[in-house]
Image (tube, grey):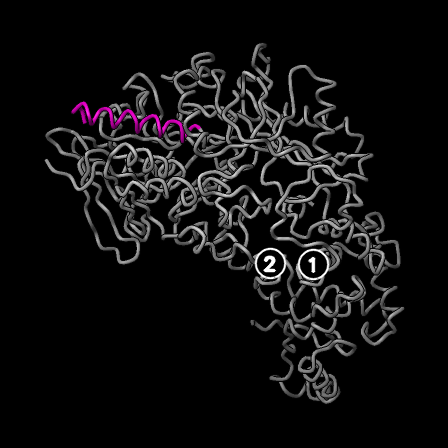
Amino acid sequence: MTYDFDAIVIGSGISGGWAAKELTERGMRVLMIERGRMIEHQSGYENEMKAPWEMEFRGYGDAKLLAEEYPVQSKGTNFDEYTMDHFVNDADHPYQTSADKPFQWRRGYQVGGRSLIWGRQCYRWSDYDFGANARDGHGTDWPVRYADMKPWYDHVESFVGVNGSMEAMPQLPDGIFQPAMPLSAGESLLAGQIAAHYRDRRLIPGRSANLTEAKEGRSACQYRYLCARGCSFGAYFSTQSSTLPAANKTGRLTLLPDTIVAKIETDPRTGKAVAAQCIDANSKETSRHTARMFFLNASSFNSVGLLLRSASDAAPNGLANSSGTLGRYIMDHATAVAGVATIAGLDDHTYYGNRPSNFVIPRFRNLEEAHPDFVRGYSYQGVGIRANWPRGVHMPGVGADFRKTLSEAGEWRILMVAFAESLPRADNRVTLSDKLDKWGLPQLHITLHHGENERALLKDAAAEAKTMLGMLGGKMLISSDEPDLAGSAVHEMGGARMGRDPTTSVVNGNSQTHDVPNIFVTDGAAMASSACQNPSLTYMAFTARAAAFAVEQVKAGLL
Amino acid sequence: MPPVSTPASAPSVSGPGASDSAAFRRRDLLVGGSALAALIFATPYLSRPIMMHAEDFAPLLDSVSDILLPGSLSTQPGAFLASVMPREWRGLTLSHVKTVSHWLNRHAQGDFLSISFERRFAVLTALDTATFDRAAAETGESDAAVDAETVEAWTILKRALLTSFYTSQKGGSGDLAFNLVPGRWDADIPLAHAPHPLSNDWLAIWFS
């Protein structure tokens, strides 16, 4: 059989870009299909360099429009008037969810996907994470361990450009880092207090995909913190700045934007996937593209939705779903503002510039000693800033003295957000709804509720945050142990989990579906547990690893 | 923009900074007021509430802004807020402005915009003080006490006025520093080296 392409990559975000890069660089002719529009690097970043006074709503957006058409997206991080074109219009892209605690599905449908608007924090997972399911019995055991992943973390970090510090913490393995972005004065003060009072924890600079040294045609970070608008300097990792140019350079990439993959077609004789049936997002015309293999990188839940939609007589419950677990065991980190406090005695220190990163206090629970109240762990991410003019809303004042006060730096504040691990549970799942979208495809129904373990983790995180922040001598402003609505972390994972056993998992240790060997799922859908670290770096590592495996299979005549 | 009905006792908008068109429209209303009262019982059509628009309050917003942040008048806060208020920018609605206007007129014992600057300053200060004086607001015992509705309205209006100023070029790059491309991250420097924070310190803006 002849194929239009060696591989079709569905989705052009963080993992899709990696799949395209790795496959083309290994000699494959690749079609990358993206449901959203093209956004060109640099010229496509329309609001990148605008000041607030150049925007109709000064950067805050049209509140009525946002309430009507962006009710989910507008409540998320990095969404504002400058960046809203990098998020979906909720009204155009509906989904179903539970009414009492609706899942917050934050999406970016464009070339680059959410790589344009992601938080850029990059952390390796350790064997505390890859071994977690086996250790406490929640979920199925990962078929890989850190030793399997380390070379691929090295591989992707070397290309991405991750800044960070070497810390020798077994729960957060060090990597190949560019120089770290230093802690602000307030953060350093808290780091010192924690170091002086605790042996089990440490506050360290965040590790982010922002260059602190120029590399490969990309400039070092200019400390603007305008990342989500798109960065013409190419200083943060995105499909546009990094993987797409690399894939294009091979001459073997075809990019097809504005195209929705409705279904993956299989050959009933072989059981293998043979084609992607597509719908033009604008004209609604249909098309069909064949390939030797398929990489699903449409984002966790959209990849699951595509497999569910691809049901056939041979696979009536969805493609690659002989285990019956497709769509189940979805997760998202449970987050809460564990603490916000002021700092006393640091008023003569400040900072300059916009660091596009944060600090992190890596997990310290359930490493060597089991906690009596919960399994797994949490980490904190936060920032230390000096309050700016909006503090004036919350303080009395009128007149010249008030204006003068607001023109000066406000008090130091430290914010700590807890990210708690989400346990994989069968009743947290994605299914197909009876309701259709405007292309006639079933909408997704997403049910994801945080459980008692997540609540116990956040309760402990809030209490510990208050104790740590209390050492700063300031005032506690906020502390919460109530989890934000699921989806708020934008770390949705699972639904096509990885495992050794075809009867309990969807993909094997090579990210290949057990049922259909020429389909690879290498985005967040394949995650079997959630850890408490940001997952994107691990998606990249799995994708690069799977691409190498897939090409070997092709060369061996097995695909 | 959609019209909003309001009683005939809406605020006067005379005073410095009033836009010509808004002031003209307002004068027409006031001049015609007595004739309107005479006819109001005779003509069912005319007994409808007078429709007020956001721009009718632009002079009041200009005045309040210039008291809150002296010098902000040149950024035309009234015109800007009137243009974005129908879209509920920063949560601000015409209802909030009317509530604040009512309180100011009541405590000015007349038209807030017609009293001296010193008295306007005192009245607005009283509103702001009362808003932050939760105890007085809750008991209602203080003469300057405000009810919950007014507290909310003033808080939202104050936020909108502050945002209007500090996202204007004058406020954002005059009172505060502004540099869209800082080019460096100085993690710990003496305050004297950067006495005025960046108005584009985005994280600080979000977390303040």
Question: What residue sits 69% from the left and 67% below the top?
Answer: B77
Q: Residue furthest top?
A: A369
Residue A304 appears in the figure: no
Seen in the picture, residue A271 relative to A150 is either above or below; the reply is below
Circle 1 SS class: helix
Residue at numbered disc 2: A51
> In the figure, residue A360 lies in which quadrant?
top right
Which residue is painted at 63% across and 30% down in the image?
A481
Q: Give percent across and percent down for residue B163.
A: 68, 58
Q: Residues within 10 Å of mark 2 (few under 14, many from 20)?
A: many
Quadrant for the C terminus of chain B, please: top right
Secondary element under disc 2, as helix, strand or loop, is: loop
Q: CA distance from mark 2 to mark 1?
A: 10 Å
> Could you tell me residue B191's position as x and y percent?
79, 43
Residue A494 falls left or right of residue A180: left
Q: Which residue is mark 1?
A: B173
**In the rendering, at what x and y percent does residue A338 appear?**
65, 31
Residue B37, placed above or below residue A227: below
Tell me which residue sits at (77%, 34%) in the image. A343
Quarter of the figure that contains the N terminus of chain B: bottom right
Magenta segment range? A538-559
Q: At which x and y percent is residue A392?
A: 76, 52
Q: Are marks 2 and 1 in contact (CB under 8 Å)?
A: yes
Look at the picture and state if A103 lies above or below B12: above
Q: Is residue B86 above or below residue B25?
A: above
Amino acid carrying label 1: it is: Ser
Q: Nearer the viewer, residue A278 or A31?
A: A31
Q: Nearer the viewer, residue B74 or B141?
A: B74
Q: Nearer the viewer, residue B54 or A491?
A: A491
Prevailing secondary structure class for the magenta stretch in the rendered image: helix
Q: Is residue A305 left or right of residue A116?
A: left
Magenta stretch contains residue A308: no
